[in-house]
Amino acid sequence: DGQNIVLKATPNIDEQRDAMGRTFRRGLIGIQRAAAPDKVKTVHVSLPEAIMLGASETYGNISQTLAGLKDILTRRQSAEQMGGPIMMAEVTAKVAELGIEPMLRWIAFISANIGFLNLLPIPVLDGGHLLFYGYEAVARKPLNERLQLAGFQVGLAILMMLMAFVFYNDISSIVRRTLGVG
């Protein structure tokens, strides 16, 4: 009736499976959004409002990704959730079945996260180049060429290990689903 109500809720930890059959843990309090089309409300907004809402949504997406990575690093969630191009294609196919709006949200989510990851201070990525430029601006001279090369090699090794890991997860997921294991 138009009143704010403050509730205290302690989520139950529940193990669930995602669309790809991977197990993950999630805190649940027994509330979910309505998916019925008659419950969805379209709101027309001005261009400045749309830009602000888009920035807010992008920030939320990146924050959610960072929280997920933190949970993986602290072992609150399984690293099996991380997937590569095979998982991305499978999820994209499933999201495409839901309609244009979920598909556009998925595309925006992927684009924002790829952009964010590209800005990480890993030398072979744009964020690494910005790191070197920042050093050059402060020190008034470029970083030693040998250190730059070593940085690029370490950055490339990190990216190659990450790629191998997500490909392994993709292939493991396919094998588990095929064999009906896990």
Image: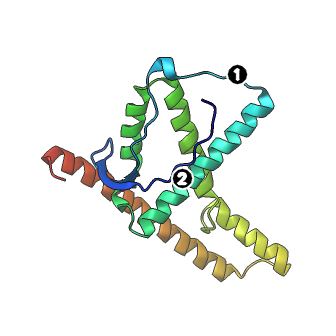
Q: Which of 160 and 36 is in front in this view?
A: 36
Q: In which quarter of the image is residue 78?
A: bottom left
Q: Which of 132 and 20 is in front in this view?
A: 20
Residue drawn at (77%, 76%) of the image? 135
Mark 1 and mark 2: Cα distance apart in space: 26 Å
Residue 29, given in percent of the width and then of the height, sits at 41, 48
Q: What element carries label 1?
A: loop
Residue 118, given in percent of the width and then of the height, sits at 61, 56
Position of 42 relative to 4 (above/below): above
Image position of 105 (left or right of 73):
right
Residue 126, given in percent of the width and then of the height, sits at 66, 60
Residue drawn at (78%, 77%) of the image? 142
Amino acid under label 2?
A: Gln
Residue 23 visible? The answer is no
Amino acid under label 1?
A: His
Image position of 60 (left or right of 31):
right
Residue 31, given in percent of the width and then of the height, sits at 43, 40
Say which mark, if any, is on residue 44: 1
Counting other residues with Cα less than 10 Å from the Cα at mark 1, is it few (<14), some (14-19), or many (20 or more)? Answer: few
Q: Which residue in the structure is indicated by mark 2?
A: 64
Q: Nearer the viewer, residue 65 or 116?
A: 65
